[in-house]
Image: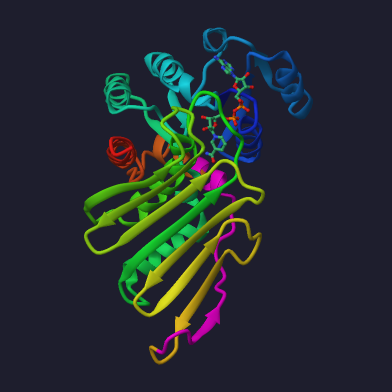
Amino acid sequence: MNNVLIIGYGYWGPKLSRNFSNSEYFNLHSVCDLRVAMLNEAKKNYPNISIYSNYKKAIKNNKYKLAVISTPTSTHFKIAKYIISQSINVLVEKPLCLNIKEHQYLNKLAKKNNVKIFVDYPFVHSGSVNFVKELINNKKYGKIKSIESYREQAPIRKDTNVFWDLSVHDVSIITYLLSEKKISAIKTIYADNKNKNFKKISIFIKYINTDVFIKNNWNSPTKVRLIKFVFEKAIVYLDENETLYKIKVYKKLNNQFNNYSLEVPNIDLTEPLMNLINHIYNSIIKNKKNLLGEKFYTEITKTMIKIENNL
Ligand SMILES: NC(=O)c1ccc[n+]([C@@H]2O[C@H](COP(=O)([O-])OP(=O)(O)OC[C@H]3O[C@@H](n4cnc5c(N)ncnc54)[C@H](O)[C@@H]3O)[C@@H](O)[C@H]2O)c1
């Protein structure tokens, strides 16, 4: 069986654990956390797992096909470096790391040790984002002209800022959707202060034919996960907060101002984390070509750095 070690059982670790334990391809073998209370919680939920407070000890005692890093962002590089040096495939929570030098170092190390790196950018594995990708590619409603993405409310983190915590989701989605297009300009319209833990940001990215606007805020009374796609012949809303009707297509009628007909398509509602796990299985066990691999992840980090340099 393909044993998995989860490192970090805080907020996101339990969601990863649930999906790995439900997977037909992987065996949730061990959970590691520095906090005893979290280890007890994990053992209560999954009585058959082994628990560890030290990931190096877990790796010494067992054989893993994959290690998953869901610890705070500032720890990702150090832990990933160790996992890869032990020739174990790794899934790292977003963002992989905070600069391109570390990113490239890990890529090189992974090649040398013949293992793969995956990053949890979950939305690129969602039915809703893939529905929109299809619309962009098949031009059913003409060319894509602009994208506005609003992502507000999330746990405030001490070791990073809203840009590396939330904007990275938007950048991953935009990079995935506009893979063929080149960036011609980036402007950060507004970040609340120059403190490295700033909480809100607005970003404008000009792709050759598409304008992208991103607005993120950790502080908000309501949770917002809304993206608006403007096509030549329709406006498409993607709302991740909706349980069933995540996509709404407003088709322009006779090209008249403010005259639309509404369509609510059926989309694949499989949990994106499960799609990601299947993707990992296909890549490391079935050896299928990995389109969301090194090149894609590097592109995301590079775009993040380009935007950061504009702050
Ligand atoms: N992909 C997503 O949509 C998504 C959503 C939420 C969080 N995340 C990412 O997941 C990561 C964790 O976020 P969180 O909200 O779960 O944080 P958290 O603080 O709730 O949990 C982190 C856990 O890691 C443990 N930990 C820290 N250092 C450790 C170490 N060296 N060894 C073992 N355990 C260690 C902590 O004790 C804690 O329980 C972050 O990188 C975050 O960006 C991703």
At which x and y percent is residue 69? 51, 25
Q: Residue at x 76, y 29 (%)?
A: 45
Q: Quadrant of residue 143?
A: bottom left
Say whether residue 197 is magenta. no
Q: In which quarter of the image is residue 218?
A: top right
User: Which residue is more in the foreground, 295 or 173?
Assistant: 173
In the rendered image, the residue lying farthest to the front is 193
Asked whether, in this view, residue 194 is left or right of residue 275, the answer is left
Say whether residue 258 is magenta. yes
* Quarter that holds the N terminus: top right
Which image quarter has ligand 1?
Answer: top right
At which x and y percent is residue 302? 28, 37
Q: Is residue 76 visible?
A: yes
User: Which residue is more in the foreground, 203 or 299?
Assistant: 203
At which x and y percent is residue 64? 51, 21
User: Which residue is more in the foreground, 194 or 119?
Assistant: 194
Asked whether, in this view, residue 224 is left or right of residue 181, the answer is right
User: Which residue is more in the foreground, 164 or 66?
Assistant: 164
Magenta-highlighted residues: 256-277
At which x and y percent is residue 85? 37, 14
- In the image, residue 71 above or below residue 303: above
Q: Is residue 67 visible?
A: no
- In the image, residue 122 above or below residue 35: below
* Quarter that holds the C terminus: top left
Q: Which residue is drawn at 66% across and 59% down?
A: 243
Q: Residue at x 67, y 16 (%)?
A: 51
In the rendered image, the residue lying farthest to the right is 44
